[in-house]
Structure formats: structure tokens, C-alpha cells
Image: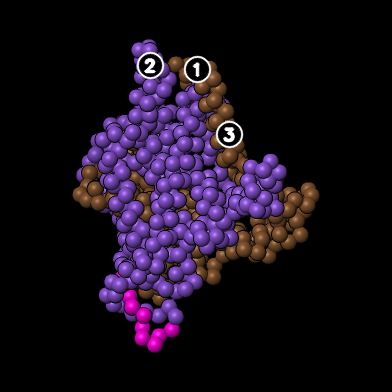
């Protein structure tokens, strides 16, 4: 599994790990118990609650939102046929956003992690700029794009003036704006782990490649990129997983419209508005299962260094 | 050709950085907008929103709730996560693989699934949703991030230092509180800041488990349909400035330290 994938996202603090002597002691149990128990109570059992809920059937003659325990497996068939377009849209949008975030994030990570290595202050400042989006409400940032893209907004006006888009064109509520918003939202999550691996990369490998008359592209393809693969894997996972389940960007009040609704939107609507809990639970489990399958296949494949 | 390529990389990266920062600048600029009700069109510069933040209905109480939730869940998650991180590095125990899996899975699960799962559980148990359920949810998703952050710090901690403490007849508790804990403080602080930021800005899980309780992100989400008051921009900008100043101080001091180390070495 992808245990290692997320660990590169953690700052190493520039120090090498010390060999740790691991001893057996009852202390370990007391250290682990509270947190593990907490996760069992509020992470594991909720997943079972989802499974139970996903098979529930409506109470005959009951009110909206009233269900009883049953084994109604048809719930799954129904949500897949009803929401097939939302399911496929989620994965398409998330894949596109992951690709775009990689194309934008990799150069940022490379410049900060490699090019700015000899300028610690500039490097530190650029790093602050890269994590700056984390400190300001992501909902307001997404709304900022909505307003920039809006029909009365500056951008649409300029594009129309230069006739780059037809005069009746619009940007908000389109697949473009949703993928744009997802790319934007997860760009730092992509760039940071890549930065962490590139920052630790030994530049002598690159020099060796250059000494052997490799052109910059070959050096990048055969040395730099393969060495940065652990970061690329965590970055793509940290982008793809939350992007698939996101429902902010695709929401009607933000960058989307009803035509761009993703799985997250229908889960939210079924759970919180329509009170169709079994449908929401079945969709959630389908989402989680597909992500786990995709992610483990991806990690296994890229683990063998043939990502290219 | 090579020089041009280099130049291209810098321009491209610069543009990507600008792309990253545009919405931040936009949000801050519009906190100074002399808006009446909806804060969409620029109507002129004013300090009024900053001077009278709580003027907009409910924005301050939502902000207060967010701070409360973030503070409580940060304390809980940091305590439990730090203990797990120490156990993972320092001790041998059975079920290590299942423990790592249990810590990894919440980070690999989309928030909407975590939120819906907890909400389904609260529904089945008949628990009333409110701020306590939000705190329960936030603590849950913060623990894994605390473990990952603190574990990196425990791994670079030299066990010889604790050994020295024991050699000087320190009791296990004394060794922990006088030696281990102070050395772990930077990692614990980083983990706590991360938890606080994750909790403060969380919307998806919160929305499933808040019931009638308002947090700042929920306020923004519900207000989005009818227009966000500029006061929301003020609060977001103020939080941003506070966080950036903290991070800048930390980054610059560590950069200076590193420079000094390289000069000395």
C-alpha cells in the first residue's frame, strides 16, 4: 500500500534520522490506546455505519428520511444508474486537475527546491508564498475566481474585447471553470511534496549527467524526474483523492452549475437536502472503494519506476 | 538555446506563482471595498469593514465558533497524535502494520466520505449535531496529520540524550518532561499549527456534522448564494496576515540559522 507516499509530505527538518532502538514495553500500549481507540470509534465504525445505511430500505408509509435496516442491495444499482454521469465526471475532472496541477506545480517545486538552493532567504520566502493559500479561506479564494470569471468581470470583458472568445461566451458554470478551480485549489498540495524530494536531491547526479554530455532534457528525464518520483506520487495522490470527492468547485454557488455536478455534490444533496441517506451512503462507499482501487494500482505501478 | 530554456523556466514559474496568489490578493483587496450588501463590484476604498467587523450579522459568532472548535480539536489531536508518533518510533509492538494502515486511511479517504460516515453514525445513535460533533470530527481527521509531522521529529531525536538523563538518575517521567518533550516541541508546534489550520478551514466534514452550528467556512458557504459581506473578507485577511507573520518569522529564523551553520562549517 501507499504508506510511504504521504510520509514524504512531512517536513524532515533537514536532519538525518537517527537509528532508533525499538524496545518492547507496556508503555507503548498506553501511548497508542487513546488515539487508536478514538480512530476506531470515529473513523472505523462510521464506515460500518455507512455500510449499514447503504443497504437500508424506506419504511413503508414512513416520512422523508425514515429508513429501516434491510439488505436492499438495489440501492447500489440505483445510484450507479442514476448518477453514472456524476461518477464519471468526478474521475475525469480530478484526473485533468491532477495533470494540470503537476504541470504547474513541478516547475515551482523545481525552482524553489533546486534553483534557489544557494539563496536560503529567497528560498524561504518563495516557500512561504507557496503555502500562503493555506492561510486564507479556500471558499473565499474559490469565490474570488468566480468573480474574476463572472460575466461582468474583468477577464471576460478583456477576452471579448480582443475577440478571443465569442461575445455570448461565458466562463462560470462550465467544466473549464470547475477543472480550473480544482487545479488551483490543489496546486500547493502537488508542489509541496515534490519540493520536499527535490530539495533533498543530490545535485552531483545531475552534474555527472552533464559531464557525460547529456542535454538538459535527457538529464531531467533520466535523473531529476526519476529521483523525484516519491514526491510526484504523494503530490498526485494529495491532489487526486480530495479532488475526486470535492463539491465546492463544482457547486452551483461557486464555479459549477447543475451540468458540472460531481459525486460530492450528489452525496451532499442526498444526505443533507433530500435525506436519502442510503443513496448518499452507497455513493460514498463507491467513491471510497474506487479511489482505493485506483490508488493502490497506481502506487504499485509507479513503485517499479516505470511511471514514464 | 540553453539560456532561453532557463529564462523560460523562471517566467513559467513566476506565472504559476502569480496564479497561486491572485485570489489571495483579490480577497484582501475586497476587504477594503465600500460595498453595501454584496461584495462583487468595486465601489471604492474604505476602512469601515475593518473597523466594524461584527457589523455583518453572524460573521463574528461563526468566527468565534471556528476558533473554539480549532483550539479544542488541536489540543486533543496533538496529544493523541504525539503519543502515537512516539510509540511508532520508539517501541516494538504487535499490530504495527494495522496501526499504520489505520493512521493512513483517514488521509486517503475523501472528506465527503469521512463526513457522511460520521453523520450516518450520529444519525443511527440519535446524537444531536452541533459544535461537539464538529469537534469530534475535526479531532479525528487531524490525528493522522499530527502523527506524520511529529514522527519526523521523533525520528531525528538522538536517544543518547535521554540515556544521559537516565544515567543522571532521572525518573522516566523526569526524562520525558525535561529532555524528550522540550526537544520535540518544534515538531509538536508544527503539528498543532497544521491541525489548527486544517480545522479552521474545514468545510466539507463540518457541513455534514454541524447541524445548526455555524463555523466561519459554513458562514461563507451559505452566504455565497446571496453574496458574501465584506466583513468575511476582513476576517479571512486578518487570519491570513497573522498566520503569514508567524510563518515568516519561523522561516527566516531557520534560514538564518542554516546560513550561519553553513558559514561555520
| Few, some or many residues within 10 Å of mark 2 (<14, 14–19, 20+) | some
The answer to whether residue A180 is visible is: yes
Depicted B174 relative to depicted B72: above or below: above
Q: Check disc 3 and report the residue beneath it.
A: B15
Please report contact status of discs 3 and 1: CB closer than 8 Å, yes or no: no
Q: Which span is picked out in magenta?
A: A52-63
From the top left corner, tell me how far across and down residue B132 is, in percent.
47, 66
Judge whether residue A58 is colored magenta.
Answer: yes
**Nearer to us in this view, B70 or A188:** A188
Q: Check disc 2 and report the residue beneath it.
A: A214
From the top left corner, tell me how far across and down residue A18 is, in percent.
31, 31
Tell which chain the image draws in brown. B
From the top left corner, tell me how far across and down residue B108 is, in percent.
36, 51
Asked which quadrant contains residue B225, the reply is: bottom right
Which circle marks residue B58 in the picture? none
Judge depth for marks 3 and 1 and give the one in front.
1
The answer to whether residue B121 is visible is: no
Q: Earlier in the sequence, mark 3 or mark 1?
A: 1
Residue at left 59%, top 64%? B222
- In three-dimensional space, the C-alpha distance between marks 1 and 2, rounded to whole angstroms, equals 13 Å
What is the chain letter for disc 1? B
For mark 2, give the secondary structure: loop
Q: Residue furthest bottom?
A: A61
Quarter the C terminus of chain A occupies: top left
From the top left corner, tell me how far across and down residue A78 is, in percent.
35, 70
Q: Is residue B249 left or right of residue B42?
A: left
Q: Check disc 1 and report the residue beneath it.
A: B2
| Few, some or many residues within 10 Å of mark 3 (<14, 14–19, 20+) | some
Amino acid at each position: 500500500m501507499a504508506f510511504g507516499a504521504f510520509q514524504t509530505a512531512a517536513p524532515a527538518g533537514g536532519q538525518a534520522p537517527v537509528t532508533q532502538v525499538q524496545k518492547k514495553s507496556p508503555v507503548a500500549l498506553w501511548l497508542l490506546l487513546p488515539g487508536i481507540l478514538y480512530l476506531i470509534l470515529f473513523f472505523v465504525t462510521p464506515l460500518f455505519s455507512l455500510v449499514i445505511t447503504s443497504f437500508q430500505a424506506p419504511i413503508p408509509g414512513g416520512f422523508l428520511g425514515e429508513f429501516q435496516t434491510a439488505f436492499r442491495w438495489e440501492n447500489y444499482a440505483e445510484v450507479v444508474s442514476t448518477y453514472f454521469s456524476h461518477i464519471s465526471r468526478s474521475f475525469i475532472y480530478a484526473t485533468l486537475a491532477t495533470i494540470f496541477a503537476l504541470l504547474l506545480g513541478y516547475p515551482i517545486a523545481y525552482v524553489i527546491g533546486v534553483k534557489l538552493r544557494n539563496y536560503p532567504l529567497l528560498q524561504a520566502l518563495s516557500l512561504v508564498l507557496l503555502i500562503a493559500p493555506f492561510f486564507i479561506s479556500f471558499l473565499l479564494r474559490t469565490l474570488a475566481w468566480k468573480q474574476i470569471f463572472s460575466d461582468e468581470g474583468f477577464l471576460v470583458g478583456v477576452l471579448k474585447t480582443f475577440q478571443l472568445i465569442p461575445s455570448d461566451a461565458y466562463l462560470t458554470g462550465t467544466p473549464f471553470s470547475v477543472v480550473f478551480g480544482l487545479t488551483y485549489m490543489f496546486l500547493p498540495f502537488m508542489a509541496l511534496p515534490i519540493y520536499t524530494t527535490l530539495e533533498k536531491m543530490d545535485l552531483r547526479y545531475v552534474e555527472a549527467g552533464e559531464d557525460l554530455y547529456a542535454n538538459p532534457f535527457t538529464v531531467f528525464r533520466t535523473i531529476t524526474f526519476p529521483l523525484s518520483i516519491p514526491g510526484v506520487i504523494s503530490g498526485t495522490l494529495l491532489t487526486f483523492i480530495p479532488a475526486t470527492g470535492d463539491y465546492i468547485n463544482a457547486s452551483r454557488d461557486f464555479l459549477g452549475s447543475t451540468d458540472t455536478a460531481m459525486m460530492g455534490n450528489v452525496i451532499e444533496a442526498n444526505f443533507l437536502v433530500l435525506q436519502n441517506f442510503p443513496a448518499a451512503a452507497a455513493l460514498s462507499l463507491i467513491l471510497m472503494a474506487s479511489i482505493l482501487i485506483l490508488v493502490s494500482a497506481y502506487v504499485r505501478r509507479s513503485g517499479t519506476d516505470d511511471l514514464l | 538555446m540553453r539560456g532561453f530554456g532557463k529564462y523560460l523556466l523562471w517566467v513559467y514559474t513566476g506565472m504559476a506563482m502569480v496564479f497561486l496568489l491572485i485570489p489571495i490578493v483579490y480577497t484582501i483587496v475586497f476587504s477594503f471595498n465600500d460595498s453595501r450588501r454584496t461584495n462583487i463590484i468595486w465601489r471604492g476604498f474604505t476602512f469601515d469593514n475593518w473597523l466594524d467587523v461584527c457589523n455583518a450579522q453572524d460573521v463574528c459568532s461563526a468566527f468565534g465558533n471556528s476558533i473554539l472548535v480549532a483550539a479544542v480539536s488541536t489540543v486533543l489531536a496533538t496529544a493523541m497524535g504525539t503519543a502515537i508518533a512516539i510509540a511508532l518510533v520508539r517501541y516494538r509492538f504487535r499490530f504495527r502494520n494495522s496501526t499504520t494502515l489505520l493512521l493512513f486511511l483517514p488521509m486517503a479517504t475523501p472528506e465527503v466520505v469521512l463526513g457522511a460516515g460520521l453523520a450516518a453514525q450520529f444519525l443511527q445513535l440519535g446524537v444531536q449535531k452541533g459544535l461537539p460533533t464538529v469537534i469530534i470530527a475535526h479531532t479525528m481527521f487531524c490525528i493522522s496529520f499530527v502523527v506524520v509531522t511529529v514522527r519526523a521529529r521523533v525520528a531525528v531525536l538522538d536517544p543518547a540524550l535521554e540515556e544521559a538523563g537516565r544515567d543522571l538518575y532521572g525518573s522516566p517521567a523526569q526524562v520525558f518532561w525535561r529532555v524528550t518533550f522540550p526537544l520535540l516541541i518544534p515538531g509538536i508546534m508544527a503539528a498543532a499549527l497544521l491541525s489548527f489550520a486544517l480545522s479552521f478551514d474545514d468545510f466539507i466534514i463540518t457541513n455534514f456534522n454541524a447541524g445548526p452550528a455555524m463555523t466561519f467556512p459554513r458562514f461563507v458557504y451559505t452566504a455565497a448564494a446571496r453574496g458574501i459581506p465584506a466583513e468575511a473578507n476582513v476576517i479571512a485577511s486578518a487570519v491570513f496576515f497573522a498566520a503569514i507573520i508567524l510563518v515568516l518569522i519561523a522561516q527566516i529564523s531557520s534560514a538564518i540559522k542554516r546560513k550561519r551553520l553553513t558559514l561555520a562549517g
